[in-house]
């Protein structure tokens, strides 16, 4: 294999994890607002490119990436107990996304599992990283929002997308990524830190608790 080859051009607003090289790649074009702005405050950058970096890292441990070892070989490096725990936890994420609908058509929780695992792990990791980066710093409101609120708001901002109905239909059947509106909602719904940031009460649509809450790591 050619280890110097990139799977995307620098102009693409996208990123990827390649299990064959155990590498994460961020083309230059994604390093712009709303993902990244050197002059923006930490909350926005961690909720944007921070969560994307976490997402790509987490792909190394999703339902596909976890089947490759550290040097890119197809090999099993999991204990049977880990694998069992992983499939019961990720099964709940399959159920969560199976329930989302566009019109009459349901999202395919299995098809989109790897991306949803990556979003959940990535957003949670980026949140922790933000807390570490801002520990002991003041948290003045910006445009009425706290730091944690701005973090989650920018996660939603990066998913602003419009699909034609025809395109949405094709994507639901073939795209391993869930429709953008469900990516904006899906991961935060499982994070108690999101509910705390916006003071959402138990029973709110974006607060998953008890058996419905997905916790993988
Ligand atoms: Zn991904």
Image (cartoon, rainbow, N blue to C red):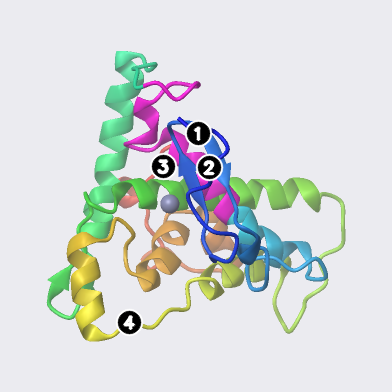
Q: CA distance from mark 1 to mark 2?
A: 6 Å
Secondary structure found at label 2:
loop
Q: Earlier in the sequence, mark 2 or mark 3?
A: 2
Residues rendered magenta in the picture: 52-73
Q: Is residue 199 left or right of residue 63?
A: right
Q: CA distance from mark 3 to mark 4?
A: 30 Å
* Label of residue 215 in the image: 3
Q: CA distance from mark 2 to mark 4?
A: 31 Å
> Measured from the top left, where is residue 189 in percent x and y?
42, 60
Q: Earlier in the sequence, mark 4 or mark 1?
A: 1
Secondary structure found at label 1:
loop
Would you call the spot at circle 3 few (<14 residues within 10 Å), some (14-19), or many (20 or more)? Answer: some
Q: CA distance from mark 1 to mark 3?
A: 37 Å
* Label of residue 5 in the image: 2
What residue lies at 53% left-to-right and 47% top-to-bottom? 6
* Label of residue 163 in the image: 4
Q: Which residue is mark 1?
A: 2
Q: Is residue 22 above or below residue 200?
A: above
Q: Is residue 143 above or below residue 19?
A: below
């Amino acid at each position: 294999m050619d280890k110097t080859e990139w799977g995307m051009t620098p102009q693409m607003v996208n990123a990827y994890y390649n299990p064959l090289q155990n590498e994460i790649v961020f083309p230059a074009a994604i390093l712009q607002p709303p993902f990244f702005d050197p002059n923006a405050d930490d909350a926005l950058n961690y909720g944007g490119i921070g969560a994307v970096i976490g997402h790509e890292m987490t792909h190394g441990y999703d339902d596909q990436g976890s089947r490759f070892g550290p040097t890119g070989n197809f090999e099993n490096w999991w204990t049977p107990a880990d694998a069992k725990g992983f499939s019961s936890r990720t099964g709940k994420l399959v159920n969560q996304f199976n329930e989302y609908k566009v019109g009459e058509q349901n999202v395919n929780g299995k098809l989109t599992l790897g991306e949803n695992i990556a979003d959940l792990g990535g957003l949670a990791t980026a949140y922790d990283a933000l807390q570490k980066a801002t520990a002991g710093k003041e948290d003045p409101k910006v445009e009425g929002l706290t730091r944690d609120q701005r973090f989650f708001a920018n996660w939603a901002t990066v998913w602003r997308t419009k699909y034609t109905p025809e395109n949405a239909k094709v994507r639901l059947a073939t795209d391993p990524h869930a429709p953008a509106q469900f990516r904006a909602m899906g991961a935060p719904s499982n994070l108690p830190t999101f509910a705390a940031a916006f003071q959402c009460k138990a029973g709110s649509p974006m607060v998953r608790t008890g058996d419905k809450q997905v916790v993988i790591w």
